[in-house]
Image (spheres, rainbow, N blue to C red):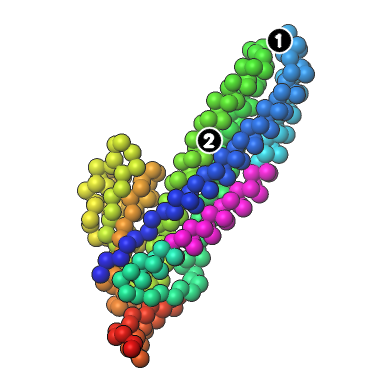
Amino acid sequence: MIARGPRPNAGTRAQYQKSLIAMVEEMRDSVLWWLGARYRAREDEIVAEDASPSRELDKELRDLIKQWGRNFGGLAEARARWLARRVNANATNQLRASMQNVGLTVMFRNSRRTNNILQAVVTGNISLIKSIPAQFLAQAHSITMQSVLAGRDMGFISKEIHELFGKSKRRAIVIARDQTNKATEAISRARAADIGITHGIWMHRSGSKVPRETHQAMDGKRFKLSEGLYDPEEGRNVLPAELINCHCSYDYDLSTIGAAEDVAMDSRHGVLSYIFPAATIKRWLCKIA
């Protein structure tokens, strides 16, 4: 039997994206407010190419960068843990519903495999979220110091900072979409492994005007969820949604459930149970009058 595979939740992605953009907006406004106060107070000296405001601004801006680094550290962990919880709930519920659609009832329990994936999702997203202010603030610092050296006014800096914000915003959007996809696929594979599903059927889904031809060729092919399929462009095996901007997914091949090494089977009262360490699947063999 084939069961519908995981699909990233659009609501989760949208909320994650919104929260990341809000963080970047707050940082942009903070930097512009700070520069508006500090830079304009020294603008006459800067235009006159006095060296002292350059040293003072450099020190103060570096202090601001450290402060935002600390701010994003705490916010990044909170956002990353939120994403992991939401994706775990969505992926688990989707798999449960897919199994229900083919007549199987699943009751999941905690598993080390899934917990390890969740921790990896949190750690990976913390690192990616922290990279946003690191890039933004480093470039904002460069823009400011170059403007001091060139004797430019605050209006020029403000324009450059807004353009820089646009780049950071686009990065936040890519991170939100890509990480929601990757987390959904990873957690779904872990949950599938918990109930003995070892294979999937590749489903090509193009996310751009120029789809990956190698992934188009993979459409409909059966593959091991632990290995993926060979991608000639990458020179290695890849999994659905693993590559940046890959929107591919898969459906579950249920043929391996009963053959799993760690499954115990029980048949009583018209119910066939597949009992795994982290889950139980029930299949009603006859209707109860």
* Residue with the mark numbered 2: 169
Whether residue 208 is in magenta: the answer is no
The image position of residue 34, as x and y in percent, is 72, 28
Q: Quick one: label 1, few (<14), some, or many (20+) residues within 10 Å? A: some
Whether residue 85 is in magenta: the answer is yes
Indicate the quadrant containing the C terminus: top left, top right, bottom left or bottom right: bottom left
| The image quarter in which residue 135 lies | top right
* Disc nearest the viewer among 2 and 1: 2
The image position of residue 252, as x and y in percent, is 31, 64
Residue 281 visible somewhere in the drawing: yes
Residue at 22%, 48% in the rendered image: 217
Q: Judge left or right: residue 158 versus residue 116.
A: right
What residue occupies the far front of the structure in this picture?
Answer: 289
Give amino acid for label 1.
Val
The image position of residue 98, as x and y in percent, is 35, 66
* Residue with the mark numbered 1: 47
| The image quarter in which residue 3 lies | bottom left
Q: Which residues are magenta?
A: 70-91
Residue at 46%, 67% in the rendered image: 113
Q: Judge left or right: residue 84 versus residue 256.
A: right
- Vertical comparison of 75 with 265: above or below: above
The image position of residue 148, as x and y in percent, is 67, 17
